[in-house]
Amino acid sequence: MEAIDIPWIKKVIKFISSGRRQVAWFLGLAVLAQQVITMQKPHELFFPDGQATIGLILMAFGLTLRCWALGHIVKEKQITQSGPYHYVQHPLYVGSFLLGLGICIILGNYLAYATLFLYFVLFYGSQINREEEKLLRKHKAAYLDYAERVPRFIPVGFLKAPKPGNNISFSFGNFSKNKGWPTVFAVLGLIVFIETLGKLMEIFFHI
C-alpha cells in the first residue's frame, strides 16, 4: 500500500474531509425535508413492521460495532489490532454505514439511499485515505503488515484470523474518551425523532 504523493490530490482530499460533518448535517436535513414534502411517512419504529425491523437490526449492529471499536481504539499511540480491529481495519466506518443503511430502510426513501452511498464514496473514502496515509507514515512496516493481514471493510476469513498483534481489552475509559456516549444518545435521539416525525405526518397529512 503506497501513500498518495500527488500534491493537488492531497489538497482535494483534505478539503473534502474537512467539511464532511457539516455536509452530513445538511444532507440529512435535506433528505428529511424531502420526506415531508413528498409525504413519505417513515416506517413505525415502536411497533415495527418487517422493513422497520430490518432497519432497526442494522442500526443495532452498526451502533454495537462502533461502540466496540470506540472501547478499543487508542488514537495516535499505536495500531489498534484488538476487538473489531482484529477483523477489519475500519470498523467505525463499517458501523456508520450499517447505521446509515438502517435509517434509509426505515425512511423508505430512495433519495436517502443515493445520498448515503454518495456521501460514503466522496467523504468517508477521502477520510479513509488520509488516515491510512497517516498510519503508513507513522508506523511504516508495522502498518503494512497489519494492512496485509486484515481486510479493510469485510471480515473475510474472520474465523481463521490470526491472533491480534496487541491484546487491548475493551475499556469504558477509552469508550468515553472517544465520545462513545454521545454516539449512543445521538442514535437513540434519532430513533425518537424519526418516530415523532412519522406521528406528526399522520396528524397533519392523515397518512
Image (spheres, grey):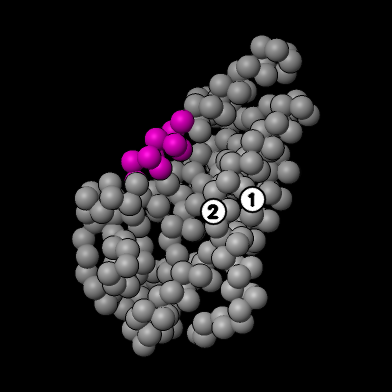
142 to 114, vertically: above or below: below
Look at mark 1 in the image and give the residue it sits on: 116
- Labels 1 and 2: the sequence-earlier one: 2
Q: Which residue is more in the foreground, 20 or 194?
A: 20
Tell me residue 10's x, y (percent): 59, 74
Q: What residue is rendered at 62% in x and 23% in y?
A: 198
Alpha carbon of mark 1 to alpha carbon of mark 2: how far? 8 Å
Q: Amino acid at mark 1?
A: Leu
91 to 78, vertically: above or below: above
Q: Are marks 1 and 2 in contact (CB under 8 Å)?
A: yes
105 to 168, vertically: above or below: above
Tell me residue 6's x, y (percent): 61, 82
Q: Which residue is more in the foreground, 115 or 40?
A: 115
Disc 1: CA contacts within 10 A as few (<14), some (14-19) or many (>=20)? some
Q: Amino acid at mark 2?
A: Phe
* 130 in the magenta segment: no
Tell me residue 185's x, y (percent): 39, 35
Q: Which stretch is magenta?
A: 180-189
Q: Which dot marks residue 97?
A: 2
